[in-house]
Image (cartoon, rainbow, N blue to C red):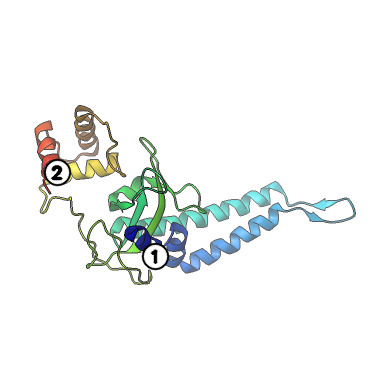
Amino acid sequence: MGQQFELAQGWTLSEAAERCSPDLASAWGAAYAAWNRARTPLPSGPVAFFRRSPHEIERLRLEVQHLSDELKANLWSLLIEGKLVGFGSREGPSTPASEIPAPAWKSLGWPKRVHSTLVERVGSRIKLFNVRIFPRTEQSPAGEPPARQPLEEPAVKSSRPATEPKRASPKQESIREAICALWPTGIPKGTLVKTRNKAIINWQKSEGRAVVDEKTIHRYFKALESR
């Protein structure tokens, strides 16, 4: 109950996007209203209706989409940089929420602006429900929602996740990056160790990162479990 109450103090994705870019949000609202008006036939006589041309309607729709993409890009940039932090429920709206790692936002999509729900763009396309956004503060323990404060002044420094190895070597960092890129919301339950290790090594090779062997990957996960 405590965590759910604290999460309720956070912002939805739409609220966070609007607070991060108020002028852009205002422009989006005006463009959306214009697009809706253009799609609505207007009476022009007893039995006739005036309709905008399909070309004009499509032009307005593209303007709405362009502004929406900019709003999302601005918000995602702050989340990837660690100036903001997000929490979401992975298995369903009623399950406990957990922190979304900053690198994971690169692989997450926001399919419907009216919902605060995320979807993986690749892989298993797992959904994250009831997503809430907070400013990152130095006092906030990793994995716990920070206290609510104005989004106009987000903290610059981000706290490191509790499970991340301190002073990671290039090989450890390469493993961590592979995990975040391949499974942004966590490695799915039931994934075979052999399959997991092969995916990590293949990603390292394709991305030009430090390539490790399976023993190193095994030690990495053992270290995480002991923390």
The type of residue carrying mark 2 is: Glu
Q: Is residue 99 left or right of residue 12?
A: left
Residue drawn 37% across the image and 62% down it: 5
Residue 227 lies, in percent from the top left, at 12, 49
Q: Is residue 116 left or right of residue 49?
A: left
Residue drawn 44% across the image and 61% down it: 17
Comes first in the chain, label 1 or label 2 = 1
Residue 4 lies, in percent from the top left, at 36, 58
Residue 226 lies, in percent from the top left, at 11, 45
Q: CA distance from mark 1 to mark 2?
A: 31 Å
Q: Residues within 10 Å of mark 1 (few under 14, many from 20)?
A: some
Q: Is residue 137 left or right of residue 73?
A: left
The residue indicated by pointer 1 is 9
The residue indicated by pointer 2 is 225
Considering the numbered disc 1 on the image, is that residue within a helix, a strand or a loop? loop
Q: Is residue 180 left or right of residue 121?
A: left
Looking at the image, which is closer to me, 152 or 139? 139
Residue 107 lies, in percent from the top left, at 35, 45
Residue drawn 57% across the image and 55% down it: 63
